[in-house]
Image (tube, rainbow, N blue to C red):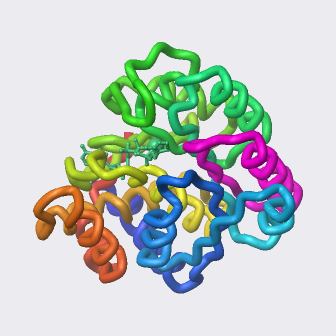
Amino acid sequence: MTTDLSSTATALFEKMRATNPLVHCITNYVAMNYAANVLLAAGASPAMVHTPEESGEFAAIAGALTVNIGTLSPHWVEGMIAAAQSANAAGKPWVLDPVAHFATRYRRDVVAELLKLNPTVIRGNASEIIALAGGQSAGQGVDSGDPVEQAEGAARALATAQKAVVAVTGEIDFVTDGTRAVRIAGGSPLMPKITAMGCALTGLVGAYVAIAKDQAFEATIAALTNFAVAGSFASQSANGPASFMTAFVDGLHSLDATTFNDTARIEAL
Ligand SMILES: Nc1ncnc2c1ncn2[C@@H]1O[C@H](COP(=O)(O)OP(=O)(O)O)[C@@H](O)[C@H]1O
Ligand SMILES: Cc1ncsc1CCOP(=O)(O)O
Ligand SMILES: [Mg+2]
C-alpha cells in the first residue's frame, strides 16, 4: 500500500459523500436498478436518463455522465451521443463502459463513435480493454475471459491513444492514465457472479469524477477502492451471490473513512 494514494482516495471518498453528486447514467436494462441502488448507498445521486429528447439537456446539469452500451438500440445510441456531446460542451467529465463491444458489428460501430467523443475515463473488464486496444481477447459476451495482467499493456496503449484514464477490473484492478499506473486489490470472487456489478462501478466512477474532474486518475482509483473495500466486507457475511448483493449495498452505506483508509490496498507501479 502507498500511504499517499490511500489518503488521497480516502479524502475523495469523504468529499464524494459530502457532495452527493448528481450522476447522469445511461446504462442497460439489466443494470439500471442495481446500479442506482449502489450509487445511492455509496453517497451519490443517480439519475437514469437516456432518451435523446432530454439526455443532452440533462448531461449539462449533472456533475458527470456515464454511458454503458450493455443493451443497445438506435434510439438509445442517439441519446448517448447527444449526452456525450453536451457533457463535452459543458466541461463535464464522462465515463464509457464498453460492454461486450467486440461481440457484434453494431456494438463495434457504436463504440467507435463514442470513442471519438473523448471519454474522460474508460472502465471495462480485461477482455473489453484488450479488444478496445485492437488486441485479440478471449471474451465472449459480457463476462471477461482474460486475466487483468494480460490487459495492462492494452490499457496503457489505449490511455495514451485516447488521452483518457483506463480502468481494467477483475481480481486485481489496474488503472492508468498512460503514464502513471496502480493496482488495487480487494473485493470478492462473488463479484463477477453478480450481473451489473461492473456497470454499477462505472456509475460510481462517474460520482467520483464529478467531484474531482481535474483528478480523473485519482478519482477512478478512489471509486475502484470503494468497491474493493465494500466487497471485502460484504464477503464476510454473504452466503452466495444473492446475499452478497444486499450485503454489498449495506457495506457501501455503512463504510466510514477510517475503515476505507485502513482497508485500501493500492499499489503504485
Ligand atoms: N475475482 C475477483 N475478486 C475480487 N474482485 C473482483 C473479482 N472479479 C471482479 N471483481 C470486482 O468486481 C467489480 C466488477 O468488475 P468486473 O467483474 O471486471 O466487471 P464487469 O462486470 O464489467 O465484467 C470490480 O470492482 C472488480 O474489482
Ligand atoms: C447480462 C447483460 N447483458 C447485456 S448488459 C448485461 C449486464 C452486464 O453487466 P456487467 O458488465 O456489470 O457484468
Ligand atoms: Mg461490464
Residue at horizontal 49 percent and vertical 40 percent from the top = 124
Picture quarter with the N terminus: bottom left
Query: In the picture provided, is 258 more to the left or to the right than 85?
Result: left
Residue at horizontal 27 percent and vertical 47 percent from the top = 193
Q: Position of residue 2 (x, y in %)?
A: 32, 56
Depth check: give the residue in front, 224 or 55: 55
Q: Position of residue 253 (x, y in %)?
A: 36, 80
The relative height of residue 204 versus residue 158 in the rendered view (above or below) is below
The relative height of residue 233 versus residue 177 in the rendered view (above or below) is below
Depth check: give the residue in front, 102 or 74: 74
Q: Is residue 83 magenta?
A: yes
| Rendered-image quarter of ligand 2 | top left
View extreme (bottom): residue: 18
Q: Position of residue 251 (x, y in %)?
A: 28, 74
Residue at horizontal 43 percent and vertical 50 percent from the top = 198
Depth check: give the residue in front, 207 or 83: 83
Q: Which stretch appears magenta?
A: 67-95
Can residue 92 be spotted in the picture?
Answer: yes
Query: In the picture provided, is 235 more to the left or to the right than 259?
Result: left
Query: In the picture provided, is 243 more to the left or to the right than 33?
Result: left
Q: Position of residue 41 (x, y in %)?
A: 42, 77
Picture quarter with the C terminus: top left
Answer with the quarter of the image where residue 225 lies: bottom left
Q: Is residue 81 magenta?
A: yes
